[in-house]
Image (tube, grey):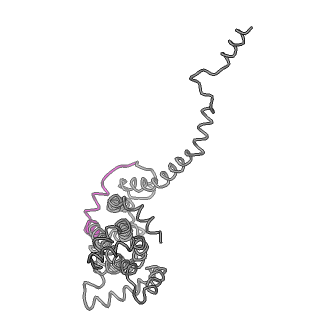
Amino acid sequence: MVNQTQTQALRTAPSPGRSIGPSRWTRAGLWFRRTGWRHLVGIVACIFAGFPILYVLSASLNEQGTLISSNSMFSSVSWGNYFQLFHMPQQPYGNWYINTIVIGLLTAAMSVFLGALAAYAFSRLRFTGRRVGLLALILVQMFPQVLSIVAIYLLLDTLGEISPTLGINSRLALILVYLGGALGTNTYLMYGFFNTVPKEIDEAAEIDGAGHVRIFFTIILPLAAPILAVIALLSFIGTVSEYAVASTVLVSPEKQTLAVGLYDFVSQKFSQNWGLFSAGAVLAAIPVVVVFFFLQRYIVSGLTLGSVK
């Protein structure tokens, strides 16, 4: 009798290699509730963000150049649009490309430098009108730059009569307009970051005989590299994609930027060519992507630390 009971117990007991925990489906449900739904959201976000890129890339490879023909993605693959972009004398895409990169890089570099100088002054120096100046920076940035286009045109038209390099159809004048428009926002962002740098470092350097110029270039700027990278990236992207001011200042086709020039491909009702426009847009995105990957290691820390104060 005892032997039969022990034998039955051994048959009903789980084997050593068999798990007595929840089933496979139960574990899968727990994994999805804890982690899996994040993967699903990520996949949906990638599809949502990647579809327009694939659509533009497909349209750029379609030589027919119409919206209807572009609906069938990758139905026709040809590099003709990319080749044609650089062989149109009336629409010098190569000049637009060079103008955009030069104006974007110069604007980004000078925006960072001028903004850092102003932010250092507001963060480290105490002078009359400091608080009023900070408040003015915030108030001025509340008004969009588009509202000042008429004033910018009249100002540059007047300056052009004195010095053509500062008037209408001057790339230097456009850079100066961009610098003036972005100085307030950049200064305020850097001001918050500079406040996170301990002032004891400045005081130690002053004891060793360093002045403000040496402290700014050898101590503050290296420590503020993340926010400088963020400002440079935002300035470059904003300059490359800006249309309203650039179309007002730059008149000659050979001096225009990509945003202004590409608009001509689709602005006229009976001469719209979405294939050329898409090919130009794909090439225009390359400099932005390159700058982003070059500065990406500073972006997260620059955005988070700059918002501490």
Picture coordinates of residue 72 (x, y %)? 45, 50
Identified at 41% across, 79% down, the residue is: 184
Picture coordinates of residue 195 (x, y %)? 42, 73
Q: Residue furthest right?
A: 1
Q: How many marks?
A: 0
Q: On screen, 8 above or below 286?
A: above
Residue 122 can be seen, yes or no: yes
Q: On screen, 137 above or below 197?
A: below
Specify the quadrant of the image occupied by residue 149. bottom left
Specify the quadrant of the image occupied by residue 157. bottom left
Picture coordinates of residue 52 (x, y %)? 45, 56
Quadrant where the N terminus sits is top right
User: Looking at the image, which is closer to me, 204 or 65?
Assistant: 204
Report the magenta residues as a range. 75-96
User: Looking at the image, which is closer to me, 131 or 50?
Assistant: 131
Residue 264 can be seen, yes or no: no
Q: On screen, 262 above or below 150?
A: above
Picture coordinates of residue 82 (x, y %)? 30, 57
Q: Is residue 195 left or right of residue 107?
A: right
Identified at 55% across, 46% down, the residue is: 35
Residue 90 painted magenta? yes
User: Looking at the image, which is closer to me, 214 or 89?
Assistant: 214
Q: Is residue 4 left or right of residue 35?
A: right
Residue 234 painted magenta? no
Q: On screen, 71 above or below 20?
A: below
User: Looking at the image, which is closer to me, 175 or 252?
Assistant: 175
Identified at 41% across, 75% down, the residue is: 191
Q: Is residue 183 left or right of residue 138?
A: left
